[in-house]
Amino acid sequence: MLTLDFHPTGRHFLSIPGPSPVPDRILRAMSLPTIDHRGPEFAVLGKRVLSGIQQVFRTRQPVVIYPGSGTGAWEAALCNVLSPGDAVLMYETGQFAALWHKMAVRLGLKTEVLGLPGAENWRRGVQADLIEKRLRADTQHEIKAVCVVHNETSTGVTSDIQAVRRAIDACKHPALLLVDTISGLGSAEYQHDAWGVDVSISGSQKGLMLPPGLGFNALSARAIEASKTARMPKAYWAWDEMVEMNKTGYFPTTPNTNLLYGLAEACDMLLQQDGGLDAVWARHQRWAEGVRTAVRAWGLEIQCADPAVYSPVLTGVVTPEGVDADKVRQVIWERFDLSLGTGLGKVKGRMFRIGHLGDCNDLTLMAALSGSEMGLKLAGVKLASSGVQAAMEYFAGHPATAVLKKAA
Amino acid sequence: MLTLDFHPTGRHFLSIPGPSPVPDRILRAMSLPTIDHRGPEFAVLGKRVLSGIQQVFRTRQPVVIYPGSGTGAWEAALCNVLSPGDAVLMYETGQFAALWHKMAVRLGLKTEVLGLPGAENWRRGVQADLIEKRLRADTQHEIKAVCVVHNETSTGVTSDIQAVRRAIDACKHPALLLVDTISGLGSAEYQHDAWGVDVSISGSQKGLMLPPGLGFNALSARAIEASKTARMPKAYWAWDEMVEMNKTGYFPTTPNTNLLYGLAEACDMLLQQDGGLDAVWARHQRWAEGVRTAVRAWGLEIQCADPAVYSPVLTGVVTPEGVDADKVRQVIWERFDLSLGTGLGKVKGRMFRIGHLGDCNDLTLMAALSGSEMGLKLAGVKLASSGVQAAMEYFAGHPATAVLKKAA
Amino acid sequence: MLTLDFHPTGRHFLSIPGPSPVPDRILRAMSLPTIDHRGPEFAVLGKRVLSGIQQVFRTRQPVVIYPGSGTGAWEAALCNVLSPGDAVLMYETGQFAALWHKMAVRLGLKTEVLGLPGAENWRRGVQADLIEKRLRADTQHEIKAVCVVHNETSTGVTSDIQAVRRAIDACKHPALLLVDTISGLGSAEYQHDAWGVDVSISGSQKGLMLPPGLGFNALSARAIEASKTARMPKAYWAWDEMVEMNKTGYFPTTPNTNLLYGLAEACDMLLQQDGGLDAVWARHQRWAEGVRTAVRAWGLEIQCADPAVYSPVLTGVVTPEGVDADKVRQVIWERFDLSLGTGLGKVKGRMFRIGHLGDCNDLTLMAALSGSEMGLKLAGVKLASSGVQAAMEYFAGHPATAVLKKAA
Amino acid sequence: MLTLDFHPTGRHFLSIPGPSPVPDRILRAMSLPTIDHRGPEFAVLGKRVLSGIQQVFRTRQPVVIYPGSGTGAWEAALCNVLSPGDAVLMYETGQFAALWHKMAVRLGLKTEVLGLPGAENWRRGVQADLIEKRLRADTQHEIKAVCVVHNETSTGVTSDIQAVRRAIDACKHPALLLVDTISGLGSAEYQHDAWGVDVSISGSQKGLMLPPGLGFNALSARAIEASKTARMPKAYWAWDEMVEMNKTGYFPTTPNTNLLYGLAEACDMLLQQDGGLDAVWARHQRWAEGVRTAVRAWGLEIQCADPAVYSPVLTGVVTPEGVDADKVRQVIWERFDLSLGTGLGKVKGRMFRIGHLGDCNDLTLMAALSGSEMGLKLAGVKLASSGVQAAMEYFAGHPATAVLKKAA
């Protein structure tokens, strides 16, 4: 029998931008005994997670929980509100936006992709003015949905969703707003209701700190209305039975009970603390700035070229010309048992990604930065100065809000 | 904070026909740290589970593993090999066959449902001669697939899949054979290759002893060929990228890593023991006969009316006229912390189900039978004699093969 | 690597009178990360378990918690209050009383053992009148301590501790009362303060539902006073530093942190429920009567010959002349994966023991009784009637208080 | 209910010199179901851990495993080989040596303590020449035992045990050599047989990576011989019954089953890897040098003043005059969720301790050093240069042997 415990000494540092490290609290919750999903106890669990996940999405509208991955939740969003051949306006901010587009094409939708020209496109957020311009031109309202990615996991760019909403509203266009916040939810600010999103899509393995295996759709009244006439074939992903049955705390098909235990715990961890979700968002912003401070000190470029949309979830680090980022990652993994995210798609080999989502603290990040700095040097990258040093100054000089409060 | 540990004293007996109790070994495996699904370690895990699940399906052909439930795996099977409006021949053995049919309709397929007339239909297995007759009439080969349920979880009937294969072959009909073995796999004999199945569908929460959250499709060369031209929209469920990428041990989208740890352990538990899978199948047959012996002693009817297709996975127990089976179940649950399966669909209130799938032994079943017998009496059901007594005689008189071998 | 998971299918039934099965809740609690036992967090844990265990002992006086087994706690009790050569009056109710006596001899105490003559001695509780008689004769007050076992684990006899207290008081003898409630605490009624015990001794692996590894001494003011002048050499077991430091929630030496997490959970499980400890004691009485009902139906003798002192913790079952009880146990273990307690000392081979302590419910006991009944028959024991049948009638006919309340 | 999970975000860094962080592998092993310690399975576990721990002590002689702490194992060593009033020669290397001495006094032994004068004593290892000189003077061989601490946890000094053995042999003195390797075993080189130790004492919560709760005595033929006539009262700690019964894999009293599961796993982790224990010892030496490199870069003093006896287990860091080391620790704990060891006894407030024992890797240490460096600065300590920088250079420049081998 091969062992599946790959890390012989000390704790592995999983610093990829998801799946994020699963805290012990959640692993313990997931080990509760599986119960009858048709039995009287289940409704307690069902209602609790349905209410908890609503709070995490900041919505009072239904959230659908699927056994499935984020990819499944993408498909769910598309096939519930659209009909074959419907026009969809998408915006390519990176690899995941590109993959979502690929899925839409595959599902038979008529897609149109916006974006800035050239490499810049993957270094900046959604340009709401481009969307507005395009929608204004669509006087026949053929475009049924606008699809954008909130936090682009491949680049470390967190787009301004409110701006997209304003763009749609400005031209009074009826297109639905579909937002992928798979990697944003639970680490970056996200407000489904206040931002006027029609379908928000997420997954379990990022800010929610769970293993992969749950996909989410947060709905709006308009999205639900659209789903009643949309003609894409759908069964597993169909909202109707799910939303109806969820009212009682139950699910029409077999839910992923043990991951739901974990979800209940994750919601508690995010919501039941001093400052609630706002405090969570603030701490990821702080960690992100600490990491960026390190990257700047190294003299390396941050993949996100617009400080206004820096991601609190992950930071993309561009390696110098001629340095294969994946070779750097390999050295780091072999020598320091640290996993960093690879460059995806068109930035493959040109950058690596440091996650600061989910269950972190200053020292898990210092470990990740130390391993990165040692590995960069071992891989022959010349660094301008010590990023570790800079990050320590940042973290020491900028106490987290929770620490400040405790001291007050 | 509400507690989610619902059972204050002693161990809850989860005797529903799935989700089945998750053994500690699997819970422990599932608590291994989540790793980078793009990192070098993952391929070890990926190859191991892909090989393990093939052995469990008794196939050398690809098995696709989805984050999702069995319902999702149903949809995957249909949408990979069929095109909108395709004719599909289904056979209703019970509630799950009916639900699969409902899904096919919803997905826009042209379905035709066979079955015996009246209540008998849910008490017997697939009648292969009806299928053969219908296929012979389909001289234009309009029927693209025959869909049957191997182990019908709602009734406790395990149909003869080989007979269905022979029926199709007898009339040289090119229809694909799609088989739902969601609750059969890992407890009841199943042989994907030897039985000539084109797509076998399963899930994690039954004989595999895992929590819900994984769906499976085992494929055949003909199914793969069909998938290349099938025109049902598909993305998440599409086999092509999955099968291709699985060759390296990786997955195109984020796999459910922690459930895969559990799957690796489950495969070890099923395959790495004296007698392997054959021994597993034999022990469930023995447990099933013990349970049926009890039901007969009680003087109650077994839902499955044909002894040739008694299920080794679960036994449906028909309550006497005038006795609400769900009231019986409620008494049992309240008094003895034992969960039994409810009657589904058209047998709601008329029967309950005792699971003997997954991780059982003689005494977990004796506990379930004791709780059932006490509860039946408390609910006012007159019993002919003690089923518990009869089951003890059976179990004591029929040692498991493993025990016999040890003694030899 | 040898596997240490010995039970290949289904859950092992551990029905020995301790260690008792450890509930998942406690295993989960024990997996919390070990913390600095000198750090600020530890005091929260320390205070919580010290307060919890006091409530379980029903005392407001100090309870000392040792890393160690119950045997260690015996030694602690003796060496804290006695001096070399001190006279100690002990009472032999069974093997554990005999072992405690052996220890006292080994430690250099001058022991005297009371008891009924012959085999009867191990079938009845402490005869307080014998103690009173002996103490009255000790006009010089040479006897420094009276040592009795509350629940004798080897026989299933729960002696009347209040009667012993009254006996001592009746003759105004200053001897300290030392009581071993290793297997009683948490399952059988026990009241350290109200019963006037000077030192109560217990362990973690019985009614507290923890793995072995903690020993306890509950103290009285007189015991503490005695410890100040007692001259038995002591260091590890010495109360003084422990009691002093415990006031702050800390321990003078390294405490068994992870077992303390488990202890905190165990105290919650025992104390934080409807009816509290009284309800716990009542449910074990009910389970015990159910088990005895089975033994009587079998036509076998209960080791405890005095119904007034039947143990709520375990029941000793005497096998008929000529039947080796250990052969019966072996058959049961091999065939049904059920562990029963062996006969100890002078009843070796003549009886086996069924535990109903710690984390039980009606069905775990029905499983144990079923396995026992099948095994007895397989071992060739003629049974008068079905004990399983009788127990079912008892359990069905006598709902637990909690159930009654729920229904009310 | 108070929660006992004290660390709300990210993983706590437990960098005290024990208890050391318990790896998940061991926590998982400890959650195996408790079994009957008198049943047939237990012998497999018992033999496995008894054999494993022998290999860890590098001995072929018996090792006794106690439920208890290291303090208990100290007492066990003393009371098995000594008689009341026996003369014992001890050597004070730090707080734990002092506490062991205090225990010996309390147990009624006639102790004599050697050591260097003044503060130097706690900064250097055992001076074997002082021992030799004293033993030569003991021409009547009144001294029955020489007691030394192998790795002094309070200071970070690892004494040369072979030198002590040579000193005793040089004067042909019959005194037994008792060595406390509580914090050394499993991280620092230790060879019970080759070094001629008579009783080696250890515990579970340091290099063995377990929670506290097990104490060990490794014996020699001479020690066993001595135990036969030694007259200190002993029962719980007595070797005789334990050694005898352990031959069959069983224990005379209730063993700490779940910690034994953990011990089996710990032995596997230490022994079943490339290079075995030698590789483990080498990696702790490397980590220790990395940490010392950081301390030197800070311009702070290392508590151990003799490089020949630097500890591979922990490093004591002396804070500058006027800086309260505990205030520094408090800042570090509050701001960075990092626990460091406090100064004990006479160095209280003058130093803190960084553990590099048990389950570490380069990045867990970089995290600890980063937190320490930030905290030192926040506490107002002027540092000469960045220790973090120096440690990164050391770790990057000195690959672990395992890494070198992999590359070869």
Image: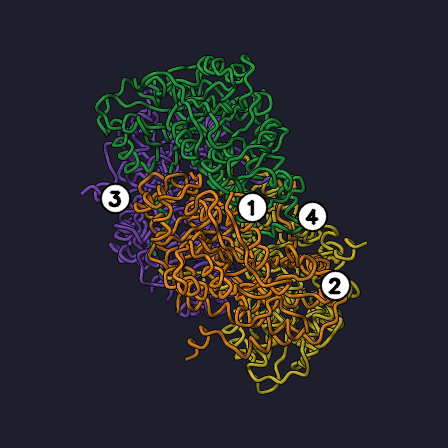
Chain colours: A purple, B yellow, C orange, D green
The image shows residue A319, relative to residue A364, as above or below, that is above
Q: Where, quadrant-wise, is the N terminus of chain D in this rendering?
A: bottom left
Q: Amino acid at mark 4?
A: Gln
Q: Do tag 4 and tag 2 residues touch (Cβ < 8 Å)? A: no
Chain letter of the residue beneath label 3 in the structure image = A
Q: Specify whether residue A85 is in view.
A: no
Residue B272 - label: 4
Chain letter of the residue beneath label 1 in the structure image = D
Q: Closer to the camera, C67 or B300?
A: C67
Chain letter of the residue beneath label 2 in the structure image = C
The residue sitting at the left extreme is A408
Residue D255 - label: 1
**Mark 4 nearby-residue class (10 Å; few <14, some 14–19, many ≥20):** few
Distance, label 4 to label 3, CA atoms, is 51 Å
The image position of residue A331, as x and y in percent, is 48, 26
Q: Are marks 1 and 4 on the same chain?
A: no
Distance, label 3 to label 2, CA atoms, is 69 Å
The image position of residue D274, as x and y in percent, is 60, 27
Q: Secondary structure at mark 3?
A: helix
Front tag of 3 and 2: 2
The residue to which callout 3 is attached is: A402
Q: Do tag 4 and tag 3 residues touch (Cβ < 8 Å)? A: no
Q: Amino acid at mark 3?
A: Ala
Distance, label 1 to label 4, CA atoms, is 31 Å
**Mark 1 nearby-residue class (10 Å; few <14, some 14–19, many ≥20):** many
- Is A89 situated left or right of D165 in this image? left
Q: Are marks 3 and 2 on the same chain?
A: no
**Mark 3 nearby-residue class (10 Å; few <14, some 14–19, many ≥20):** some
The residue to which callout 2 is attached is: C323
